Amino acid sequence: MPERSERPERKPRADAARNREAVLAAADELFAHCDSPEAVTMADIAAAAGVGKATLFRGFGDRTGLIHALYEMRLEPIRRAIEEGAPPLGPATPPLQRVSALLDAVLCFKIDNRHLALALEGTGGDSPYAAEHYERWHGTLQAALEPIPGLADSNFTAHALLAATRADLVEHLVGRQGMTREQMRAHLAAFTARVLEP
């Protein structure tokens, strides 16, 4: 009777899911406590997660892919609140209130995830404004601005307001100048009100 060739066993999907969770948790921890996002390497993340570098590249493609996956995971609760939640972020919110809440949510996310946001904005290639995450925020904000009466250009206004939440500016004001979270939120709210006042 001919010997049956043994097929290599495929790794169970549960292992892949566990590895993915371990990698994202390790990357999250490393970005949260690093001196600079450039200092976090794929080798560091693999070692902290207890997986091989090949597992990282298989699961995420490259460092940029991993940063995007981590950003999306952290942002998911905010995205759900924007798409289907109650006021002040949800779609039923009056436009002026919603624009202010959207910008506050972006700012708080970037303050809470400063190094991750810096790493992500550093992956924008030729133009950070062509990056998927930026286009998504811009589109959401522009849609919220459009119903506001007397606003001439929602496209430009969305760009100008988002500029106040860039990760490098947040890092400069919070990390270098020592501005507190509440001070930044108050400044952004006042700036937004001035831009949008009739």
Image: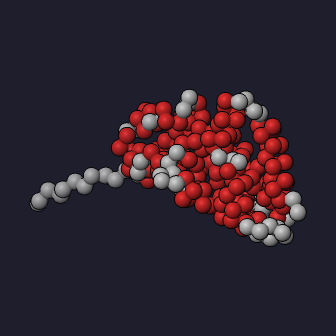
- For the point 14% across and 56% down, which residue is it? 3
> How many dots with numbers?
0
Q: Position of residue 143 (x, y in %)?
A: 72, 67
List x then y, in percent, for residue 17: 48, 49
Does the rendering let one see residue 161? yes
179 above or below 68?
A: above
Rendered image quadrant of residue 131 = bottom right
Residue 192 in percent (x, y) is at 80, 53
Q: Residue at x 76, y 37 (%)?
A: 181
Q: In the rendered view, would you say 189 is above or below 156?
A: above
Colouring method of the image: secondary structure
From this viewpoint, which residue is outermost toward the front? 152
**Most foreground residue, 85 or 112:** 112
- The residue positioned 59% from the left and 38% from the top of the image is 115
Please indicate, yes or no, whether residue 92 appears anywhere in the rendered image. no
- The one nearer the camera, 87 or 179, is 179
* Of the pair 91 and 193, the residue shown nearer to us: 193
Horizontal side, residue 32 vs residue 142: left or right: left
Residue at far right of view: 198
Quarter of the N terminus within the rendering: bottom left
Percent of width and height locating residue 42: 42, 38
Residue that appears at 83% across and 59% down: 196
Q: Which quadrant of the rendered structure holds the C terminus?
A: bottom right
